Amino acid sequence: MHEAPSQASQSTARGQTARATAILVTGAGGEMGHDLIRAIARSEENVAIVGFDLRPLDRNVAQYCAETVVGDVQNLELLQSITDRYSFGRIYHLAAMLSSSAERAPGRAYDVNVGGTMNLLRLAVDERDATGRSPMVLFPSTIAVYGHPTLEHKASAGPVQEHEHLEPRTMYGCNKLAAEHLGRYYTDHHRQFDEGPTGSVDFRAIRFPGLISAETLPTGGTTDYGPEMLHAAARNQVYDCFVREDSRLPFMTMPEAIESIVRISSAPRSALTRSAYNVRSFAPSAAEIHQALRAHYPALTVGFKPNPGRQMIVDGWPGDTDDRAARADWGWSPAHTLDSALESYLIPGLKAHYGNA
Ligand SMILES: NC(=O)c1ccc[n+]([C@@H]2O[C@H](COP(=O)([O-])OP(=O)(O)OC[C@H]3O[C@@H](n4cnc5c(N)ncnc54)[C@H](O)[C@@H]3O)[C@@H](O)[C@H]2O)c1
């Protein structure tokens, strides 16, 4: 997955500008963007990274980027202007409005999550036309693409496979599923009328569960109660959990999520049997997260005060997903159970972060 060493843009004899090879990361300033950019910079020394986000990137992440661009993924012209300077062989399209935020502003969520993805796919097609190579587009999808109509349905479904229960009940889930389909279209069917399918893009999606980082707190997501409870424990705060104790969802740690992205990026296209894969590490109820945390923070007090809207979203998402396809096709394997994640990653990380855990 290494690419040619980056080079500063140079003038050619014909007066045109040679483009530097680079990786584009949208949503670079977010939780996942921070960790992914650091991981790429560490493992691929000579690659140039262009970080793109609505907000200026903080130094922690900007220091790894050859260039940072502040802008909106809805702005196709701005995105295209970056490709005057860079040739992107890989695009990590992380920018999105997350589930709770999307539910509050569904129209804007559609524009950002579907329209923005369409713009990145257009960029990839342009790149294919210019170079003859299909850029890889990595897309973090979500368990929100699934939808259970009732709690009984959720309880009896068991771990959900990729083709099951694809009836999302949130705008975010609808957006992500639509974006997955667009990526699959550009990979398998683009230009089928004129030339036969050309495979303009190499689109790869991972359907992530809730992600828990020892360093950052998420905002605007519906799995946020997991990380929020953990960070509240480390800060000796009482936590009011916005879902019921019996609410169950799959989770994984942020380093596992980054490892899965690195792994699927390294897999040969021929090994992939689908365009979107489940990954997961553990699937505790909210009460089980509380209980596991109490072993480390005996004084932790959690009040369960369900927020009706967010509870409804959690009740519609799967209690667990089936990750066998990712294991078989590209060697995915979770590193942690909830207990081992706490012991070997989360608690040490929180201690380093807050200094008082
Ligand atoms: N965090 C999770 O639990 C989780 C789970 C499943 C999938 N995902 C997906 O992973 C990706 C990254 O998530 P995250 O946790 O880092 O989220 P985040 O909210 O921390 O980061 C998203 C980033 O995208 C940027 N952004 C939002 N709208 C934009 C726009 N219109 N143009 C440019 N930038 C914009 C934001 O400024 C932010 O820096 C998202 O696509 C999300 O849907 C996250």
Image: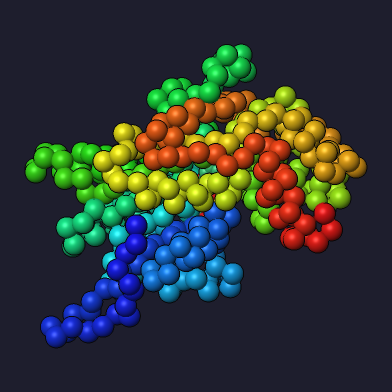
Instruction: Report the side of 8 relative to 346 (left or right).
Output: left
Q: In this view of the protein, which residue sits in the foreground, 81 or 7? A: 7
In percent of width and height, residue 233 lies at 81, 47
Q: Is residue 356 above or below residue 57?
A: above
Visible residue check, residue 212: yes
What residue is drawn where x is 68% and y is 41%? 340
What residue is drawn where x is 80% and y is 51%? 234
Q: In this view of the protein, which residue sits in the foreground, 242 or 213? A: 213
Q: In this view of the protein, which residue sits in the foreground, 15 or 306? A: 15
Q: Quadrant of the C terminus?
A: bottom right
Q: Is residue 122 above or below residue 114?
A: below
Instruction: Report the side of 292 relative to 279 (left or right).
Output: right
In percent of width and height, residue 95 lies at 48, 54
Instruction: Report the side of 18 relative to 137 (left or right).
Output: left
Instruction: Report the side of 66 relative to 298 (left or right).
Output: left
What residue is drawn where x is 13% and y is 83%? 14
Q: Is residue 242 above or below residue 228?
A: above
Q: Is residue 15 above or below residue 191?
A: below
Question: Colour mode?
Answer: rainbow
**Residue closest to the far right:** 299
In percent of width and height, residue 4 lies at 29, 68
What residue is drawn where x is 43% and y is 60%? 25
In percent of width and height, residue 114 lies at 40, 45
Q: Within the image, what quadrant is residue 209 found in?
A: top right
Q: Within the image, what quadrant is residue 125 found in?
A: bottom left
**Residue closest to the far left:** 194
